[in-house]
Amino acid sequence: MRIALSQLTTGPDPAKNLALIEEWTARAADAGADIVVFPEASMACFGTPLASLAEPLDGPWATAVRAIAEAAGITVVAGMFTPAPGGRVTNTLLATGRGVEATYDKIHLYDAFGYAESDTVAAGSRVVTIDVDGVRLGLATCYDVRFPELFRAHADAGATATLLSASWGAGPGKVDQWELLVRARALDATLWIAAVDQADPAAGGVAAGGTAPTGVGHSMLVGPDGTVRRRLGAEPELTVVEVDADEVAAVRKNIPVLANRRLGEKR
């Protein structure tokens, strides 16, 4: 399976971001990708008033993403915001195209490092996987990467890879934490992780202020043995990577951490 890691920088205007998604999806399709993964907050960057721009899943933004995926003939995974009760929104990953139609609502909200996502965002509760060309893939978002049980749940559901979209918060040591956590989750669940962050706005010449998590770049593909197979820098970039589902079985045979579990084991 060929997965495009689409590390771009989104701004506050959903229409402009949609144009970026259309352009980068076409690039991914031309490069032979089966799936293109965009970052969290692809609809609009954090630091933007979210309640006023959130749309339902049958609204114009999601409908346009579906049309983009259909035209390109690949699966598109992109972060958006949908309305939630009490004036909040839901941080949603939309996966659509190539026979796929699913959504994942971010379970673990980023209430850390002085930022409180839960002030404006309602948490999800469902573990979600999708099947693309016979390969099962889990969906996760940003702060989820600090919680290994979600990635093990993907493995228990039959996934051989997790698609992780993020808009990682900047700060001292945060890039190192990003790589450490992505690699650790791959080892925890012995699966591939395609981790796609927003590019560092400064690397693309975009000023970013405040405490909102607007991305640091360094998207990566990590193998089921925890090794980094492809790593991007801080600037906007698209790359296509290969994921071999058969490698997961081989790694799980040699490192059977899922089978050897005693706490929280699958029942």
Image (cartoon, grey):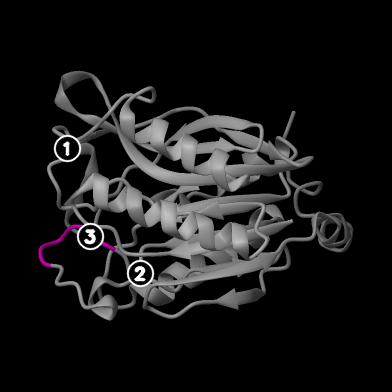
Check disc 3 and report the residue beneath it: 113
Q: Which residue is mark 2?
A: 199
Q: Earlier in the sequence, mark 2 or mark 1?
A: 1
Disc 1 residue type (three-letter) = Asp
Return the residue at label 1. 119
Residue ID at (58%, 37%): 97
Quadrant location of the N terminus in the rendered image? bottom right
Q: Residue at x 76, y 54 (%)?
A: 257
- Label 3, label 1: how far apart the Cα atoms are: 14 Å
In the image, taking residue 111 as reference, residue 153 lies left or right, namely right
* Tag 1 secondary structure: helix
Viewer-proximal residue among 72 and 41: 72
Task: Say what amino acid the circle numbered 3 marks.
Answer: Phe
Magenta stretch secondary structure, dominant: loop
Please rate how many residues cluster around mark 3, counting C-alpha atoms within 10 Å: few if below 14, some from 14 to 19, many from 20: few
Tell me the CA gap for discs 2 and 3: 20 Å
Residue at (15%, 61%) from the top-left corner?
Answer: 211
For label 1, the crowd category at 10 Å Cα-Cα, with few meaning under 14, some 14 to 19 and many 20 or more, is few
Frontmost of labels 2 and 3 is: 2
User: Does 70 appear above or below 102?
Assistant: below
- Residue 79, percent across and down? 39, 45
Mark 2 Cα-neighbour bin, 10 Å: few <14, some 14–19, many ≥20: many
Dividing the picture into quarters, in which one does residue 204 lie?
A: bottom left
Q: Position of residue 22 (x, y in %)?
A: 43, 51
**What is the span of residues highlighted in magenta in the rendered image?**
209-214
